[in-house]
Image (cartoon, rainbow, N blue to C red):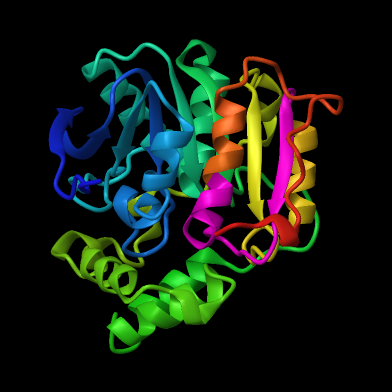
Amino acid sequence: MTAPTTGTRHTVLGAALRVRTIGEGTPTVLLHGGGPGCSAWTDFAALVPELVPALPGRRLILVDLPQYGGSDAPRADLPLFSFHARYVIALLDDLGIRRADFVCQSLGGSVALLIAAREPHRAGRIVLTGSRPADLGGAPGVSGAAIRAAYYGGDGPTPDKMRDLIRDHEWNDPAMVPESTVFERFRNSVTVDALALGTDAEARGLPEDLGPLLGDVTAPVLLLWGSADPFAGVGYASRLAAALPAAALEVLPGTAHHPQEERPRDYARLAGAFLNDSRPPSPDSRLAPVEAARCES
């Protein structure tokens, strides 16, 4: 499959967002995480070739959120999740999409949950990974703000610092991190806009806790989690699943914060089974558990 490396730019709310589209059919929006240099393609390039056959009749829409990848970088005028959600909703309107399913990494998952809570008619089914939308107790995970400060601090970003960031915090097996991912993430992290926003938390959007809104998320949600996620462990994922009205949790062993990159075939199989199923998640209709011996990728 030829990768849509450039995509198109759609201007909404005065900012151009980079969008890559694959296939036709039911709209399924992929929203990436918030780490330095992240974009839709860095977070989902390994997954897309597995996800396309797992989701026949789907239009995959890979969105670079504002301030990331090939999108413009307006200064946030709302708290973090609300800032990004407003642009995603405006983009869906621009594309003529009233309702979509979502596959999301970290920041993107919290944005999708906020959309589902505030505008439930916009969200069908949601797959989210490594998201921490609320303070739900338990031991805190590693601090994304501290990691960002270290990356942009000192002598500034370097390829070695990016490689260490991904190996130490995002992948379970550091030997498997592709150099192409390191290069693309580093390149995205040193644009003029990225450097200006690097440690400016206010400009990127102040922290936001969605705890009071989680009970309003009526959309079915699959939490597809890395067993060794240092940002939000399996215990946090369990509490998040319990706080959502219709959620199921599946854990991918031997993965960390980016299981869709480390085990794309298994991730696509589980995400596909969930998104193609019209039944709500329940203890009696769980997806088959993933065991280490069954992992294929």
Q: Nearer the viewer, residue 91 or 204?
A: 91
Q: Nearer the viewer, residue 40 or 201?
A: 40
Q: Position of residue 275 (x, y in %)?
A: 55, 26
The answer to whether one can see residue 79 in this image is no
On screen, residue 108 above or below 191: above
| 204 relative to 183 in the view: left or right | right
Q: Position of residue 218 (x, y in %)?
A: 65, 18
On screen, residue 207 above or below 221: below
On screen, residue 155 above or below 109: below
What residue is at 45 percent from the left and 76 percent from the top?
A: 165
Q: Nearer the viewer, residue 219 or 7?
A: 7
Quadrant location of residue 26? top left
On screen, residue 170 above or below 49: below
| 261 relative to 87 in the view: left or right | right
Task: Write the start and end of the magenta stretch as one range.
Answer: 244-267
What residue is at 37 percent from the left and 11 percent from the top?
A: 98
| Residue 112 lies in the magenta-colored region | no
Q: Position of residue 235 (x, y in %)?
A: 79, 54
The answer to whether one can see residue 86 in this image is yes
Q: Position of residue 191 (x, y in %)?
A: 17, 65
What residue is at 54 percent from the left and 58 percent from the top?
A: 263
Quadrant of the image for the C terminus?
bottom right
| 83 relative to 173 in the view: left or right | left
